[in-house]
Image: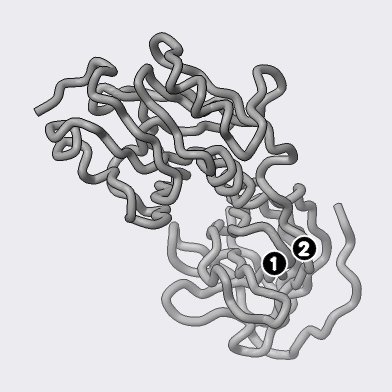
Amino acid sequence: MQQVGEHAVPAGPLAVRWLAYELAEQRSGVTTKARLRLQNAGTAPWRSRGREGVQLAYHWLDPLGNAIVWDGDRVAFPRTVEPGQEVELETTVAAPRPPGSYRLAFDLVEEFRFWFAEVGSETLDLPLDVRPRIDARRLAVRVHGAMDPELETALAAQQEALVADDAVAVAHLVTGSAPAPDWSRLLLDAHEEGYAAVGPALEPAGRGDRKRLAAWAPGGGRNPHFPAPVLLPSLLEGLEPVEHEGLPAYARPDRLFEGRAVVRLRSRSGRPTG
């Protein structure tokens, strides 16, 4: 574990002495584990009561100290920590989006009452570079059905080179689909930013399909809180699609609807039309 240097510890009932920490590399949008050792340097015991009482938590701040994520993951103490006692805790840390320079500030919180820093204790501040979620911009394509000339032409026009091997993400398309030229670039941008699954907007040719797939129409912008599954998703390595509306889909968290990445769907691709 990395030892923490000397820092100010106030006198009084609520004070923390940070002793050591162990932290994994931080990648945008990824949750990792951290381990901290700290001492109750005050005169009052620390007691956790399930999700209430004293908890270890954290903030993500920008380099100027502005809060990016204020309420980080919580972890309770396994026992009462009396004054003078040391304790070691393992917690989870969810890295922010997008990648960049941040400060990770660990603190204790008396849940629903106050943070220890608000009553004079110091936080454990760690300047960190949060790395992109992917190291390389390599996208593979899986066609559900047969490759057709229009799809082959659309893929050849992509602004990002598509690969068959060593891809970091796989985009799922179907017979009769044709992605716009900036589709692959926008998908990889979103993966770099920290999303595991990215779904494009859909532009069906048939009236029936347009009505049925209206929620996925272009013009919706980028939406990390999209309420429906994303369709024809690009998925990071290890993820697999399910099916929704007869198309490959992804419905779990950590997904983004990218309304600027458009895929056209031909009526003759086999889906019902109106």
- Which residue does the numbered mark 2 point to in the structure image? 128
Q: Residues within 10 Å of mark 2 (few under 14, many from 20)?
A: some
Task: Give the camera-side residue of 50 and 112.
Answer: 112
The type of residue carrying mark 1 is Leu
* Above or below: residue 91 compared with residue 262: below
Which type of secondary structure does the marked residue at label 2 adopt?
Answer: strand
Q: Residue 196, relative to residue 86: is it above or below?
A: above
Q: Would you say 190 lies left or right of 243 here?
A: right
Disc number lying in front (2 or 1): 2
Against 188, is 164 above or below? above
**Looking at the image, which is closer to me, 129 or 139?**
139
Q: Is residue 163 above or below residue 86?
A: above
Q: Is residue 234 left or right of residue 228?
A: right
- CA gap between label 2 and label 1 equals 7 Å
Expressed as whole percent of the image width and height from the top left, the position of residue 267 reads 23, 24
At mark 1, the secondary structure is strand
Quarter of the image holding residue 160?
top right
Is any atom of residue 122 visible in this view?
yes
Q: Position of residue 4 (x, y in %)?
A: 86, 67
* Label pair 2/1, CB-CB below 8 angstroms: yes
Task: Name the mark on residue 104.
Answer: 1
| For marks 2 and 1 on the same chain, the one whose residue lies earlier in the sequence | 1
